[in-house]
Amino acid sequence: MVLGVAVAVLLVVGIGLLLARAAGFREVRDAIASADSTWFAVCFLAQVIALSAYAAVFRGGFVWGGRPDPGFGLSAHVMLASMGATRVFAAGGVGAIAVTYWCFRRARFSSDDALVRVLGFNALFYVTFGIGVWTAALVVALGLWGEAPAGFTAPWLVLVPVCAVAGAFLTQPRRVERVTARASVVRRMLALAIAALSWVRAVPRDPGGWRLLAATVLYWAGGVACLWAALRSVGVGLEFPELLLAFAAGHAAMILPLPLGGVGGVDAAITFALTEVGVPLAVALVAVGVYRLFAFWAPTIPALAALLLVRRAGMQLTRIEASPSLR
């Protein structure tokens, strides 16, 4: 863990220095000197909201179908532990999925049930994310609100509908039954992925599904609000669609298999995205530094502590009785 954090710090410092050199060290220094630290409290509060919403999504996925409620405290422990795993051990969010799956298994979920829920509520995050970003790209492309290059909006306008159509096609009930009936390893993995998408599709139709949807939206809202406050601290105000597109560019980088939670690559991606919507490079670099301080670095110590204590969370989950499979 110590080695991973040390490497992450070196990556951030190295990339930051390269970007600062490109922007001009004097301009970066001036942007830092003029930053208003009162906005940092808003950044902190926004991240608390985002992380609380993340824990609420885990909790909602756990109790789905009448399972016992693990409570917010235990859900928050699992959430932080999964975040700690992503920080150090794996790329592209795989560490978070592995730790969350392990926790579901400690609660006596079957292996299939655990995978469906973990993949399902992670997919739910990106469904709400995709809808929001596609809407922002559309209003910008139509010239209704904000400005951004066509190359910045077109990928979202194309990819999100393609993914939506593919998801709707794959989760037709007859197709799900046909795929899940096969016994090969490839078919089995495909069946689990499709079952997870079917779980996402069932969420809006469930009486309690609105809580899960609200929690995922609140998670993204907290992250966007943190970036907005970071920009306000350096005197920049963007139109909401522009802000959302810049935020989305950074999270697209997180999906890539970058080590150490995408540190360095995410910072560079958001900085570049901000310059595409008109923010000067030096100011964008400082704003992203503030944002990542609260979004990445501040939760890292509690996340690593939660990861070290994840066995304790597993023992608590073991005492929670699990009911039959949701499927």
Image: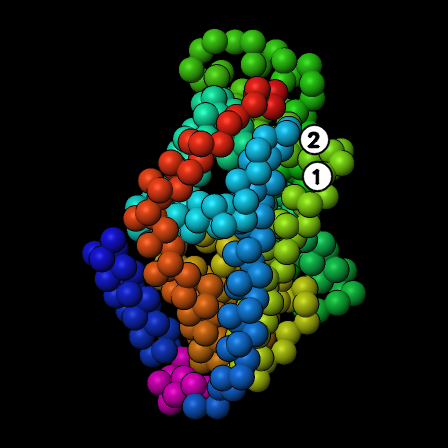
Please provide percent x and percent y for residue 68: 57, 33
Q: Residue furthest front?
A: 319
Q: Magenta stretch mostly in which secondary structure?
A: helix
Q: Is residue 101 left or right of residue 167?
A: left
Task: Assess whether mark 1 and mark 2 are in contact (beta carbons under 8 angstroms).
Answer: yes
Tell me which corner region of the image, top left, top right, bottom left or bottom right, holds residue 142: bottom right
Tag in front: 2 or 1:
1
Q: Is residue 226 above or below residue 5?
A: below
Stretch in magenta: 23-32
Rendered residue at 45%/25% (across/down):
108
Q: Is residue 231 visible?
A: no
Disc number placed over residue 324 in the picture, else none: none
Disc number placed over residue 209 in the picture, else none: 1
Please provide percent x and percent y for residue 195: 58, 24
SS category of the residue bearing label 2: helix
Tell me which corner region of the image, top left, top right, bottom left or bottom right, holds residue 220: bottom right
Rendered residue at 75%/67% (across/down):
145
Please provide percent x and percent y for residue 31: 46, 86
Q: Is residue 213 left or right of residue 93?
A: right
Is residue 39 or residue 8 the one in the foreground?
39
Rendered residue at 69%/58% (across/down):
136
For the residues marked 2 and 1, what is the alpha-carbon distance in whole angstroms?
A: 8 Å
